[in-house]
Image (tube, rainbow, N blue to C red):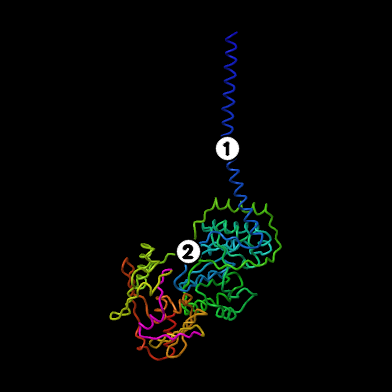
Amino acid sequence: MRFQVQHAASKRKSIQLTMVILLLVSLFLSAVPVKATEEDGNSAKDEQEVYQKLKTGKRVQQDEKKYVTPEQPTVYLTFDDGPSKLTGKVLDILEKEGVKATFFSLGEQAEEHPDLVKRILKDGHTLGNHSYNHVYKELYSDFQTFWDQIQRSEEVFADIADTRPQLVRAPGGTYTNFDAYYYYLMDKAGYTVVDWNVDSGDSKRVNVPASEIWQTVKGSPLEHELTVLFHDGTGHESTVEILPKVIEYYKNLGYAFAPLTIDVKPKQFQVGKSKWSRNMSAAHFQQLWEETQQYVAVHQHPGLQQIKEEPKNTDEELAKQKVAAAEEESPLLAMQPIVPLKVHFSRWSSVTLEPEQYQLRSNRIELSLRFLIEKLGGNVQWQDKTKTANAHYGIYDIEYDLPTRTIRAYALGNSVATYSLADMELQEGTMVVPLRKTVDSLGGRITDTVMEEGRREVSMAFRQFYMLKENNSILKNSLFALAG
C-alpha cells in the first residue's frame, strides 16, 4: 500500500515536471515569432507614416547621396525608344566621334534587336530601362503596371546581355506622369530615375526637320552638366542626320561627353499635378512596398558598367593622374589647402600662392581670375553693373559672364567662341575660376602637377600667340580647337 502511494506521488511529480518543460519549450518557441511580429509591426508603422507624407503629394527623399561633379562641362547624350534599325547608324556616328552615350531602351524593341543591345554595351555605352511597351495609358494607370513593365524589360535585358539596368527613364518624362508614390517606390527598389534638361524636340511631332532640331538644341541654355534628350526609335531619321553637327557644336563650346552612371546626379523634374486618375490606398501602398523590397532582396544591383579607357600618355594626363593619386592617398590634404601652391608659368616665371589665395574643390584648383591674368602679364576689368569680367591677354580678350556662366572669346576683336564655365563664382567681390579650364581658354595647358605633403606645384605652358597669322579663319579655327 505504501509503495503504491509513493509510486503515485512519483508519477504526479513526473507529469508536473513534463508539463513545466513543455510550457518552457512553448514559451521559448513562441518568443521568436512574437519578436518578428513586433519588428514587422514597427516596419509597417514606419511605412504608414511615409504613406501619410506621400499622400500630401510631396516627395519623401531617401538618404542624401553624394554625386561626382565632372571638372569639365559635360554633355550626356541620351537616346530613347530604341533599339531600331536607326540605332546602328547612331552607334556608328558615336564611334567615329569618340563619344559615349546612354540608351534608354524598350524591352519590346530589345527582343526584336538583341544584337544592338549587345553592341550598345560592347561599345562602352550605358543601357537604361525605358519600360516594355511605352504605352502611357498602361504605365500610368497604376504603379503596379509601371513596376511590372520595368521588371519585364529587365528580364529581357538580363536574358540578352546578362545586365539589369539601374537607370530608368519614364516614357514622356516624370512631370505629370509620376507622383510622389512612383518616385518613392522606385527609390526604395534601388533605381535611379532620369529626366533631362535639354529637349532636342525631335519627338514633338512626326518627321521633325533636322534644321528645327538643330535650332532647338542651339537655343537651349548651357549648364555645367547637360542631359540631352534624343530618340533612336523608328521615324527619327532627322536625329541621325543632325547628330554629328550637334556633337561638333558642344565640342566647340568646350564640353566633354560621357555616359550616364549612378554617380551622375540625375536630372529630375518636379512633381506636378498628375494628369492620370489614380488612387493609392494604404493597403495597396503596403503591398507595393513589400514587393519592391522582395525585389531588392533577390536582385542586388551590381551597379553600371564602368567605362575604362586606356590613359593617354601625355603630360596633361600624367598630371591628372598625379592629382588623383595624391587625393586618394591623402584626402584631407586634397580637401583643404594647408601649404603654399607654387605656379610655374614658364621656365623663367613662377609665383607662390599662400593657402588663403587658392582653394581645392572636386579635383579642381580654384583661384582669383584677376590674380592669374595679371601674373601672366594681362589685365582684368570688372563691370559691376553687368557682373562680367573682361580679361585681356596677348591677342585674346575673354569675357566672363557671371549671370549666364558663359565665356565669350575674342581674337583681335573678332568673336570666335562662346562656351560654358559653370564653375565661376563671385567670392567676397573676387571672381574665382578653375585654374585648368581658364588656362585652357587662354591657349595653354597644365603640363605637370605635384601634390605631396608639404609641397604643391603646378606647371603650365602657353603657345606663342603673336606668331599666329592674323587671318580670321585661321584664328577662328585655332580658338575653336582651344575651346574644345
When the figure is inspected, residue 480 is found, relative to residue 151, above or below; the finding is below
Three-letter amino acid code at the position of disc 1: Ala
Where's residue 347, x and y in %?
28, 79
Where's residue 79, x and y in %?
56, 69
Quarter of the image holding residue 24?
A: top right
The disc label shown at residue 122, or none: 2
User: Which stretch appears magenta?
Assistant: 362-384
Quadrant in which the C terminus is drawn: bottom left
Crowding at dot 1, Cα within 10 Å, few <14 / some 14-19 / many 20+, comes out as few
Where's residue 296, x and y in %?
55, 53
Rendered residue at 51%/84% (across/down): 386
What secondary structure is found at the residue carrying circle 1?
helix
The disc label shown at residue 31, or none: 1
Crowding at dot 2, Cα within 10 Å, few <14 / some 14-19 / many 20+, comes out as few
Where's residue 344, x and y in %?
32, 77
**Residue 215 vs residue 116, the one in the foreground:** 215
The reply, left or right, for residue 141 in relation to residue 250 is right
